[in-house]
């Protein structure tokens, strides 16, 4: 597996673009902060009710924008640098919107810059808003400057993962197998919300204070995972769903009986002020989008594992070619 494959994933903002159809606006730097992943209180943040994510609730057929004359036709989508599920969903949207006659630009930069750009109207929409916890600080800051354009995924969550043939089944019994894992959980970026949650919630909850928890980067964690899997060694790592590693390796999540890692996150489309008014049909298309965990992993496997992020758009098109009904079902509101 190449170094560039090992460098990406959620909570990392340090992967360059090589697709040829994205504009790199800024970014770089380590893991994104925000919520800790442990807050379970129902929240309404700005225009977004984070408790009511139903990816199919607002589904409806999308009219042809060229036939209705309602929509502006040029759309800029903000894409978080290094977030693979964001690459997947933004390229899906680009292909679908271009098929409907829009001109679409993908502008890649880090999460904070992207949120600012959407709130200020310099970008039209972002499609990888993690709520209620991971991106709560961004949405709280910009409040009513963001329009809720629907959630498309409701199975995002933080985990501690192990190789599937290792002994521990639960975080509660991990310490019983300390020797098997070398008394070590491999972390990601020091500033990531997952790192904070693991240090402040997981480790004390499950009595792992004498375990090592090295943190450096998502890329370094994935390199250790890759090495351990190739050598047949046991390993425990901080990870999250959705992530391409679940397609690339035979790994599984440890059960979290105390709920230390928090509840599921939901992935939202968030538009600039006036997005619904300027793009009523495009807004409906985005509200129709719903990807299952299986579908997302299939696309990430093609894009990241098989193609090493070379030409992301073509990777998404490859998946669409294998699933020829998806695009029409999406437009019809039938996903």
Image (tube, rainbow, N blue to C red):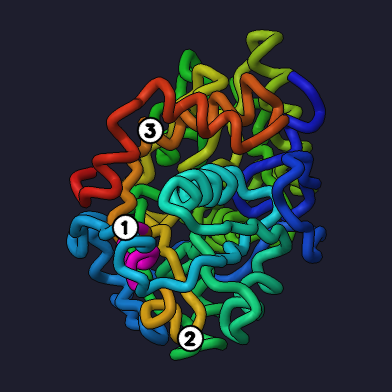
Q: Between tags 2 and 3, which lies in front?
A: 2
Residue 122: x %, y % from top left = 65, 79
The Cα–Cα distance between marks 1 and 2, rounded to whole angstroms, is 23 Å
Residue at x-position 57% and y-position 58%? 103
Q: Disc 3 or 1, which lies upstream in sequence?
A: 1
Q: Which residues are magenta?
A: 280-285
Residue 283: x %, y % from top left = 36, 67
Residue 190: x %, y % from top left = 74, 57
- What residue would you read off at disc 1? 64
Residue 329, picture quadrant: top left
Residue 306, picture quadrant: top right
Q: Between tags 1 and 2, which lies in front?
A: 1
Q: Residues within 10 Å of mark 3 (few under 14, many from 20)?
A: few
Tag 2's secondary structure? loop
- What residue would you read off at disc 3? 295
Residue at x-position 62% and y-position 86%? 120
């Amino acid at each position: 597996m190449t170094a560039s494959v090992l460098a990406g994933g959620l909570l990392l903002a340090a992967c360059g673009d090589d697709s040829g159809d994205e504009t790199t606006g800024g970014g770089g730097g380590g893991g994104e902060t925000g919520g800790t992943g442990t807050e379970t209180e129902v929240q309404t943040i700005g225009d977004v009710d984070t408790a009511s994510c139903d990816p199919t609730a607002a589904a409806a057929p999308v009219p042809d924008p060229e036939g209705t004359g309602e929509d502006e036709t040029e759309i800029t989508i903000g894409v978080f640098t290094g977030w693979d599920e964001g690459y997947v969903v933004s390229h899906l949207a680009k292909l679908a919107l271009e098929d409907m006659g829009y001109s679409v630009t993908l502008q890649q930069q880090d999460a904070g810059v992207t949120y600012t750009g959407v709130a200020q109207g310099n970008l039209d929409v972002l499609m990888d808003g993690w709520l209620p916890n991971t991106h709560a600080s961004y949405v709280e800051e910009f409040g009513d400057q963001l329009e809720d354009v629907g959630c498309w995924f409701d199975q995002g969550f933080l985990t501690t993962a192990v190789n599937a043939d290792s002994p521990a089944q639960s975080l509660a019994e991990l310490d019983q197998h300390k020797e098997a894992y070398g008394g070590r959980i491999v972390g990601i970026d020091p500033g990531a919300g997952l790192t904070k949650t693991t240090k402040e919630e997981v480790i004390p909850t499950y009595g792992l204070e004498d375990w090592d928890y090295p943190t450096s980067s998502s890329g370094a964690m994935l390199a250790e995972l890759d090495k351990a899997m190739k050598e047949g060694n046991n390993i425990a790592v901080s990870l999250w769903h959705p992530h391409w590693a679940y397609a690339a390796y035979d790994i599984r999540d440890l059960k979290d009986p105390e709920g230390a890692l928090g509840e599921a996150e939901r992935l939202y489309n968030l538009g600039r002020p006036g997005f619904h008014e300027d793009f009523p049909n495009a807004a409906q298309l985005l509200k129709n989008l719903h990807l299952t965990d299986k579908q997302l992993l299939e696309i990430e496997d093609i894009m990241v594992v098989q193609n090493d992020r070379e030409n992301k758009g073509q990777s998404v098109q490859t998946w669409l070619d294998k699933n020829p009904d998806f695009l029409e079902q999406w437009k019809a509101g039938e996903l």
